[in-house]
Each structure stands twice: as C-alpha cells, then as structure tokens.
Image (cartoon, rainbow, N blue to C red):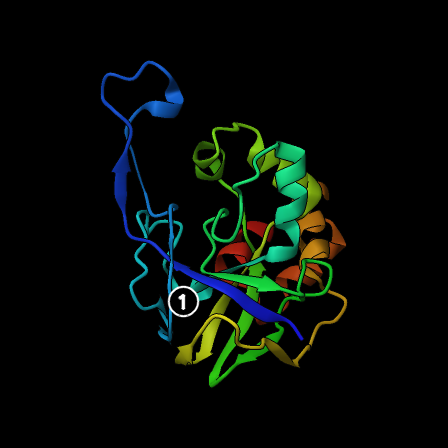
Amino acid sequence: MPHIVSIQVGTPVQYGTETATDPMDTPWVTSFFKLPVTGPVRVETEGIEGNLQADLRFHGDADKALLLYSADHYPLWQEELTIPEMAGGGFGENLTIRGLTEQSVCIGDRYQIGEVIVEVTQPRQPCWKLGRRWRIVDLPKQVIRTSRSGWYTRVIHPGVIEAGMNVERVSCPHPDWTIQRANRVFYQQPAGDLERGELAMLPELANAWREELV
C-alpha cells in the first residue's frame, strides 16, 4: 500500500549575500528548504499547517494546496546527480510518498489519508528554484525530460495526517490521464493539439494549467 514516508513544511527565508559574484549565491527568498514534521499535523484546504509560500503569484492557491513527490525517485536522482543526501523534501514537496509515481497517478484521482481526502490537480512545473536549491542550473529540464515531476493536489476533506499513514486511491475518473501523459502533452506537443484540448477539458485540472493549455 502506498504510504507517507515524510511530511515537510517551510516558511520564506532569505539566502545568499549581497556581495556574491556567483549567481547561485546572490540573495533570494524561498520556502523551498522545508523541514520534516514529526507527529500529527493538520491539513486544511489551503495546505499543511505551518507551511507558507514565498511567491503567492505561482503558489498557495487551493489547486496547489499540497505538493506530493515519489520517494521512489530519490535513489535515481542520488545516482544520476551524485548527490547522496538528496532525499525526502529535496524537491520542496510537502508529502514524500512511497509506492506512487507519475506513471500511476492520474489527474482527478482522489486519495484518502486517514480522514483527509485530496484530489490530484496537475503535475508540478519545475522552476529555477529547484535548480538553485541543488546548484544545478538545468535540473528543471532534467525533471521535465524524465517526468519525475511530482504532482499537486487540492484538499477535498481536511483533517490530520502523520508520516507512515497509508495513501489509498478512492476514485480514478480519468485513468488514461496519468501525470506522465499530462507532462508529455504540456511540454512536447504543439499548441492546438487535440490532446491538449482533451486535457484542458478535465474538470479536476487546475485552472492555471487549463489557462496555459487553451
């Protein structure tokens, strides 16, 4: 059974120095460096208690309440990038999940975690902050190429969760629309492609993604 390996939350913190000459070391504010949560934690429609976003233009709405990432990917990244310390929370996710990947998770899937129910809304779009976190400029491109993106969910029913809890799929309205397929269509297909229109019509899809597709 898929389950939560770890839970992470973050708050905006400034890193870097004003006098830095390396672009990787100049000042920036991010909530990417998340810390693990021990014990039960409350999940509301806006996200996990204690988690705050640095840039509300792209994060923080109900369609992106939680970011989930597969624990199954970390051994691959550790080997490919030669970063043995890359582990749970390393991609800025709130929930690190064992037993689910972009090949099995679909847009609109609902998962129950204890009393909490979440609904998958879109793949995670990797941005420059991921590359800066690990000092690998092209890491976002590698994520797109491999489709190891993670995925966002909205919260349908709030409640309390804890590491170790099972993650049970309770509905799958669009079994043909895996996160992997959504990534492929979004990044690789030409504008106006029929698949883009089909993806945009999924009612559970995040509004931000729908607007970019049409």
How far across and how far down the image is residue 8, in percent? 41, 59
Residue on which the image places disc 1: 62
In the picture, the quarter occupied by the N terminus is bottom right
Q: Relative to residue 99, is residue 35 drawn left or right?
A: left
Q: Relative to residue 63, is residue 209 drawn left or right?
A: right
As drawn, the residue found furthest toward the left would be 18
Which residue occupies 65% across, 46% down?
Answer: 75
Q: Residues within 10 Å of mark 1 (few under 14, many from 20)?
A: some
Q: Relative to residue 170, is residue 194 drawn left or right?
A: right
Q: Secondary structure at mark 1?
A: helix
Taking depth in this image into account, of 55 and 24 the one nearest to the observer is: 24
Q: Is residue 105 above or below residue 140?
A: below
Which residue occupies 35% across, 49% down?
Answer: 57
Question: In the rendered image, which quarter is residue 18 located in?
Answer: top left
On the question of residue 190 being in view, the answer is no
Residue type at tag 1: Ala
On the question of residue 170 being in view, the answer is yes
How far across and how far down the image is residue 144, in percent? 64, 41
